[in-house]
């Protein structure tokens, strides 16, 4: 019971109850105000059908930004600079920047197969490969304020196996920025400070698993409920399964940056999906 109470406290901490804004509509108002200050924004008004959406016209193109993920991110990272986060969102919507893929900005990102199929249904040709269960590795360019999928044509004549090495080498450069949170031996949260969308990519990096071996010397369970967080649990602990499920359920109630509601394993160095 003591161990369960310890992990329950950690799970509560990970949920982050502190709120920066009274509601998402208030936050949307701040984003709209920031958008209107930018050149090239023809209009930006509330979308009456959804308190998280904005009806905007930027550079003559009508768009409908959704602020849910940024709102949730700020509430889960209470020490984050809210103004800086809003600025990043606005830049991602208004700035035109080159998206040419190169070996310098190629990264491997974890997404679900559903995400892959959705983009394919929109006519996009993705460079990706199935990983395990419902998750896939999607190769993207790492931009200052976002990530963007690349296509096979962006790397003509290059074998996927070679590009995988390049992408993972770029992810490894962020290993010194890993932040861990969790004193209980049962579980720990990991994320990459300054590039949180690479947090789930850590499962692809052997050097990461080696670095946490002192805390998790045996097999582990891991959960990827959000795109910006990785939860690792000691598979040898009888409470690991229920703790992982609790963490996933709590995260999905928060409802932003969601990735997968499944539990995965790393057994004898191999990634597996629980059936």
Image (cartoon, grey):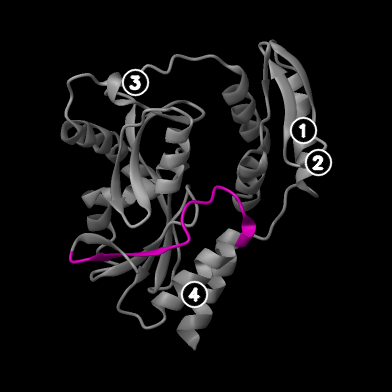
Q: CA distance from mark 2 to mark 4?
A: 33 Å
Q: CA distance from mark 1 to mark 2?
A: 7 Å
> Crowding near pointer 1: few (<14 within 10 Å), some, many (20+)?
few
Which of the 4 quarters of the picture holds residue 49?
top right
Residue 70 in picture, x, y percent from top left: 62, 41
User: For this rendering, which residue is in front, 1 or 244?
Assistant: 244
Give the mark toward the camera: 1 or 3.
3
> For the magenta stretch, what is the residue range?
253-268
User: For this rendering, which residue is in front, 212 or 93?
Assistant: 93
Tag on residue 26?
2
Q: CA distance from mark 3 to mark 2?
A: 37 Å
- Residue beneath label 1, please? 30
Decide: marks 1, 2 in contact (CB < 8 A)? yes
The mark nearer the N terminus, 3 or 2, is 2
Tag on residue 101?
3
Residue shown at the point (29%, 47%) measured from the top left: 130
Which of the 4 quarters of the picture holds residue 109?
top left
Residue shown at the point (39%, 74%) measured from the top left: 186
The mark nearer the N terminus, 3 or 4, is 4
Give the structural element (helix, strand or loop) at label 4. helix
Determine if residue 43 is in view: yes
Q: CA distance from mark 3 to mark 4?
A: 42 Å
As drawn, 254 above or below 56:
below
Residue shown at the point (62%, 32%) measured from the top left: 84
Residue 68 in picture, x, y percent from top left: 66, 43
């Amino acid at each position: 019971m003591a161990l369960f109470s310890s992990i329950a406290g950690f799970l509560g901490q990970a949920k982050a109850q502190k709120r920066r804004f009274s509601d998402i509509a208030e936050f949307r108002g701040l984003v709209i105000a920031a958008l209107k200050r930018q050149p090239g924004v023809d209009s930006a008004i509330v979308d009456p059908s959804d308190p998280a959406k904005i009806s905007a016209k930027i550079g003559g193109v009508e768009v409908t930004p959704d602020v849910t993920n940024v709102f949730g991110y700020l509430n889960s990272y209470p020490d984050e600079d809210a103004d800086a986060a809003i600025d990043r969102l606005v830049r991602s919507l208004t700035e035109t920047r080159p998206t040419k893929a190169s070996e310098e900005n190629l990264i491997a990102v974890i997404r679900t197969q559903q995400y892959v199929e959705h983009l394919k249904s929109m006519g996009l040709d993705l460079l990706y490969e199935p990983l395990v269960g419902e998750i896939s590795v999607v190769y993207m360019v790492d931009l200052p304020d976002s990530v963007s999928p690349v296509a096979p044509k962006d790397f003509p004549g290059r074998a996927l196996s070679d590009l995988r090495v390049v992408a993972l080498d770029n992810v490894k450069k962020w290993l010194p920025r890993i932040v861990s949170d969790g004193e209980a031996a049962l579980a720990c949260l990991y994320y990459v400070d300054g590039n949180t969308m690479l947090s789930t990519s850590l499962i692809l990096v052997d050097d990461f698993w080696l670095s946490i071996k002192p805390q998790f010397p045996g097999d582990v369970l891991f959960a990827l409920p959000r795109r910006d967080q990785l939860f690792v649990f000691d598979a040898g602990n009888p409470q690991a399964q229920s703790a992982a499920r609790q963490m996933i359920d709590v995260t999905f109630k928060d409802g932003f940056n969601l990735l997968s509601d499944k539990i995965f394993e790393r057994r004898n160095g191999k990634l597996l999906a629980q059936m």
